[in-house]
Image (cartoon, rainbow, N blue to C red):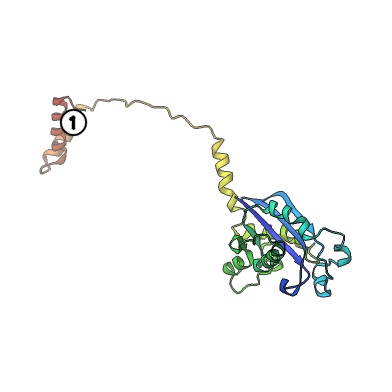
Amino acid sequence: MREIVLDTETTGFEPADGHKLVEIGCIELINFVPTGAVFHKYINPEREVPQEAFNVHGLSYEFLKDHPRFEEIHLQFLDFIGDSPLVIHNARFDMKFLNAELGRLNQQSLPFERAIDTLALAKSLFPGSPASLDALCKRFGIDNSNRIKHGALLDAELLAEVYLELKGGRQPTLNLATKSINSSLTPIEKKFYPARPFKIPEDDLKHHEAFLDKLKNPAWRSLESHIGSDKAQGNR
């Protein structure tokens, strides 16, 4: 199962106010485990970066102006994500920016149904508890000490670990490992041993008959008559 963990950084909160993407970070997962394949781009927003946004991610327009515009990298981005589900923390924020950028290029929007919102997932699993990325890293013991400022690729890497924990930790891959181990085992051949006939001592047979005589209509006598009948007819 292929999924893409995705995070973005922007110049502000609303694309309708003219804010743009400045960074995209994506990590490929197969069966919840990172494969090492990533997509990471800084983007020239063609506008100044407000101080409030710079305080969050530390990306200035002076740095970003020498990087490609979204229109120059959007086909690489779409090719990387393909049609895979998108794992995003607070998915509505990132999806509205991605679709605003795609809309400016007359490209088809990404359906929101493709998004797996880890914020909503965390809130459903831990109602009333903090569900920020930092809070979830703390809950699951994930080292986020390098997260001095937000960064799309770093946050995607942390989110990939958080997502695995939200889906049950290492347990989702347990069945795969078990199947792999079982498939390599050599089947055990069971040896057939034929039944060994033995003769009942005469004294035991006499004691058995004496015991049956004390019973009223013993079922054993009925069974013996059926067996005798079958043998007479040659049935087995």
Q: Quadrant of the C terminus?
A: top left
Q: Is residue 164 above or below residue 36?
A: below
The structure residue drawn at horizontal position 39% and vertical position 27%, both measured from the top left corner, is 192
User: Which residue is identified by label 1?
Assistant: 205
Of residues 127 and 200, which is closer to you in this image? Answer: 127
Residue positioned most to the right: 62
Tell me if 84 is positioned left or right of 20 in this view: left
Of residues 141 and 96, which is closer to you in this image? Answer: 96
Residue 132 percent location from the top left of the image: 68, 69
Q: Is residue 103 above or below residue 3?
A: below
Residue 140 percent location from the top left of the image: 67, 62
SS type, badge 1:
helix
Rate crowding at label 1 as few (under 14), some (14 to 19) or many (20 or more) other CA atoms within 10 Å: few
Tell me if 189 is positioned left or right of 122 in this view: left
The structure residue drawn at horizontal position 65% and vertical position 70%, both measured from the top left corner, is 131
Of residues 140 and 155, which is closer to you in this image? Answer: 155
Tell me if 236 is positioned left or right of 148 in this view: left
The structure residue drawn at horizontal position 16% and vertical position 36%, both measured from the top left corner, is 223
